[in-house]
């Protein structure tokens, strides 16, 4: 594991040099004369400092050498779901932070953390200060199950649970009760598998990651032995990707506990499936067949054709003690198959219920169109409907699906569309815009002080220092006030 | 021992090390190419350096815009190394920096060349399964290293079509049944 980190470091520096040389080439192309403040070039504002924001910025900076980009982020710390969503035992995915850092340090880019767009500053104010505004603020809400009992103690959204073990400030007091034997996760996407893996992984493995110390201690005392991952459709419709499934299969000291009946008829259709679906299904069937270490006291299992209908409370009615699942049958086949109830139900005893049925974007400013049904900002190729100069990228553009590469491509697309609009004259660039100068002054009158990227680097250094003393790559600060104190020290 | 056989041996050693490190759930992605940039162990590096012997071969990349980029690179370098070291302009290439955690260094090979490349690990296949425009001759650039017998090969950078993937990969929906 140490060696891996080392290789990542080597890689990181290689990438950095790569980026710098490109940046210097850009400089040469501009004659190296223009300073930011005297710029008369286009100014673009990006709302949200996660992958969508940084990939959009990266492409804008690359495609036009006169464009300045400012990224606004609500928290004092950058990188969004790469920091707060990616599982702590997936450090390799977090390598994208290296290129985001290069972007943030680019001479035509600036990062402004601790700015809550929609509250501290409105979208209209941003639109006045910039030639274009890109919404890249992601999906901070979650879909609710809409069933009785889902607000009972013992029921959590995966978003909050993930936020808890990843050190998201607003989830630090989640205190999930891990004293029960069985946990049920509703949903079978990669987030569901991340949660299952964190619940079952040996603590000695987790303690070398950047998992937050409070959750590590809670997990060390966890009594959870069995994690069931429930989906309303069948094995051929499972939403996770194969990497995450393979990680479950390979979990040490944990066995798979599946229901062979769920896989009836699957072997017959296997050969006609497209390669990714075929390999994923084969791996599941291998887990059904082999199960794994029989002596393992911990187990995980996929449960198909089941939908939640009610969270069951104990005798005192005060906390979740089980869940009632409706048994489904499939109508149709393939990706578009629908789950239909059969009328039968099944009760499962469990003290921990985590709903992982999807994230959801929420509107942040009444001036921005929002489609409540699809929970996205309505747009055409990233151009926000009926609002010239307003764009979107990432989950707020297309919904909360896909891996980081999906968001990367999608953000590059939005940036290309924006650049196209500049070249075609659809964006009026004839008027100079003040950009961050005006916005920072406005924020100051409202008592809002921003955190610049160099100030984030102080937080970063402190987190790495605290991590070192614990034998971890990083120990995240959980308190926003503490982050601010260090940033402005 | 021929250079090629030695290379295979080295790769096997790397894979074995990889297996040894796979104590945890995650895929520890050791690139199979052993070049000077990576510090596996001194022994391996020494072997590789003598193997490399400063041989340069030509690689042609067919970029998304249809333009051909040709570079001369050292044997032993991974294709990701080549893109990075030569500062080739391929958008978003190698996002996870060669750790088998994404599929952004996906490249498409000519069939004859593909056959020469040797076996693919399950972990590479897993990532390829998520790649845009997957073909039967697709590989990840971070997992393929340059050899003398690959001189002159043409690699196609696949087109990126954002809407190619369905909304099924990150979250399943377990919405309550219609009552």
Image (cartoon, coloured by chain):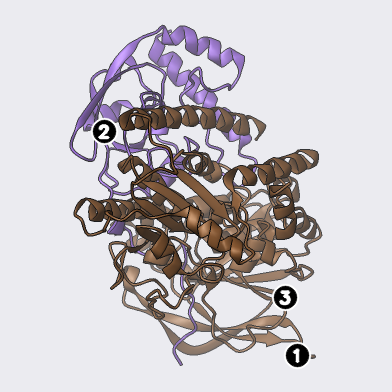
Chain colours: A brown, B purple
Q: Secondary structure at mark 2?
A: loop
**Which of these two is toward me, A428 or B78?**
A428
Q: Chain of mark 1?
A: A
Up-down relation of residue B100 to residue A112 (above or below): above
Q: Residue at x 66, y 44 (%)?
A: A460
**Which of these two is toward me, A28 or B4?**
A28
Same-subunit check for callouts 3 and 1: yes
Q: Chain of mark 2?
A: B
Q: Which residue is mark 2?
A: B109
Q: Which residue is mark 1?
A: A317
Same-subunit check for callouts 3 and 2: no
Q: Residue at x 45, y 49 (%)?
A: A54
Q: Residues within 10 Å of mark 1 (few under 14, many from 20)?
A: few
| Marker disc for residue A133 | none
Instruction: Quote the CA–CA distance across marks 2 and 1.
Output: 62 Å
How far from the left and from the top, in percent, is residue A10?
A: 55, 27
User: Quadrant where the N terminus of chain B lies?
Assistant: top left
| Residue A401 visible to an observer of this rendering | no
Q: Chain of mark 3?
A: A
Q: Residues within 10 Å of mark 2 (few under 14, many from 20)?
A: many
Q: Secondary structure at mark 1?
A: loop
């Amino acid at each position: 594991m140490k060696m891996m980190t080392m290789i990542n470091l080597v890689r990181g520096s290689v990438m950095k040099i790569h980026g710098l040389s490109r940046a210097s080439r850009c400089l040469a192309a501009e004659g190296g004369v223009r300073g930011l403040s005297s710029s008369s070039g286009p100014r673009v504002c990006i709302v949200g400092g996660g992958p969508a924001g940084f990939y959009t910025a990266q492409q804008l900076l690359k495609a036009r050498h006169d464009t300045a980009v400012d990224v606004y982020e609500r928290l004092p710390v950058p990188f969004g779901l790469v920091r707060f969503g990616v599982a702590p035992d997936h450090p390799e995915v977090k390598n994208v932070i290296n290129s985001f850092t290069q972007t943030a340090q680019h001479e035509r880019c600036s990062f402004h953390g601790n700015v809550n767009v929609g509250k501290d500053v409105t979208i209209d104010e941003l639109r006045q200060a910039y030639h274009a505004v890109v919404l890249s603020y992601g999906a901070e809400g979650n879909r609710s199950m809409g069933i009785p009992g889902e607000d009972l103690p013992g029921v959590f959204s995966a978003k909050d649970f993930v936020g808890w073990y990843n050190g998201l400030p607003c989830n630090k007091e989640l205190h999930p009760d891990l004293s029960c034997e069985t946990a049920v996760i509703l949903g079978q996407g990669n987030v569901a598998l991340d949660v299952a893996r964190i619940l079952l992984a040996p603590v000695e493995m987790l303690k070398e990651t950047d998992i937050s110390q409070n959750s590590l201690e809670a997990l060390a005392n966890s009594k959870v032995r069995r994690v069931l991952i429930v989906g309303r459709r069948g094995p051929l419709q499972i939403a996770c990707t194969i990497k995450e499934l393979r990680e479950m299969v390979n979990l040490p000291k944990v066995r798979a506990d599946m229901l062979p009946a769920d896989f009836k008829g699957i072997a017959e259709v296997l050969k006609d499936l497209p390669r990714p679906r075929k390999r994923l299904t084969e791996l599941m069937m291998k887990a059904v067949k082999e199960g794994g270490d029989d002596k393992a006291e911990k187990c995980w299992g996929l449960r198909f054709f089941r939908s939640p209908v009610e969270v069951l409370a104990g005798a005192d009615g005060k906390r979740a003690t089980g869940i009632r699942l409706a048994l489904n049958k499939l109508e149709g086949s393939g990706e578009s198959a629908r789950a239909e109830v059969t009328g039968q139900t099944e009760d499962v005893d469990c003290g921990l219920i985590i709903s992982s049925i999807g994230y959801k974007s929420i509107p942040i400013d009444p001036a921005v169109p929002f489609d409540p049904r699809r929970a996205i900002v309505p747009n055409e190729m990233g151009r926000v409907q009926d609002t010239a100069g307003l764009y979107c990228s990432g989950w707020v553009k297309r919904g909360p699906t896909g891996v980081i590469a999906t968001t990367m491509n999608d953000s590059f697309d939005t940036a290309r569309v924006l650049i196209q609009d500049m070249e075609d004259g659809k964006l009026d660039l004839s008027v100079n815009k003040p950009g961050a100068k005006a916005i920072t002054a406005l924020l100051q009158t409202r008592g809002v002080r921003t955190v610049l990227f160099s100030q984030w680097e102080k937080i970063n250094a402190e987190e790495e220092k605290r991590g070192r003393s614990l034998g971890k790559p990083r120990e995240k600060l959980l308190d926003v006030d503490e982050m601010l104190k260090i940033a402005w020290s | 021992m021929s250079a090629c056989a030695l290379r295979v041996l080295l790769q096997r050693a790397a894979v074995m090390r990889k297996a040894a490190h796979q104590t945890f759930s995650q895929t520890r992605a050791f690139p199979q190419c052993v070049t000077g940039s990576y510090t596996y162990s001194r022994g391996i590096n020494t072997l590789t350096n003598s193997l490399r012997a400063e041989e340069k071969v030509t690689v042609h990349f067919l970029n998304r815009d249809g333009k051909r980029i040709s570079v001369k690179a050292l044997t032993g370098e991974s294709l990701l190394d080549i893109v990075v070291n030569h500062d080739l302009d391929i958008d978003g290439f190698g996002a996870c920096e060669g750790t088998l955690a994404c599929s952004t260094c996906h490249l498409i090979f000519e069939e004859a060349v593909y056959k020469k490349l040797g076996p693919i690990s399950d972990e590479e296949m897993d990532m390829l399964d998520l790649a845009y425009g997957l073909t039967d001759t697709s590989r990840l650039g971070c997992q393929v290293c340059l050899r003398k017998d690959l001189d002159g090969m043409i690699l196609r950078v696949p087109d990126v079509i954002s809407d190619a993937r369905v909304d099924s990969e990150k979250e399943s929906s377990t919405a309550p049944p219609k009552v």
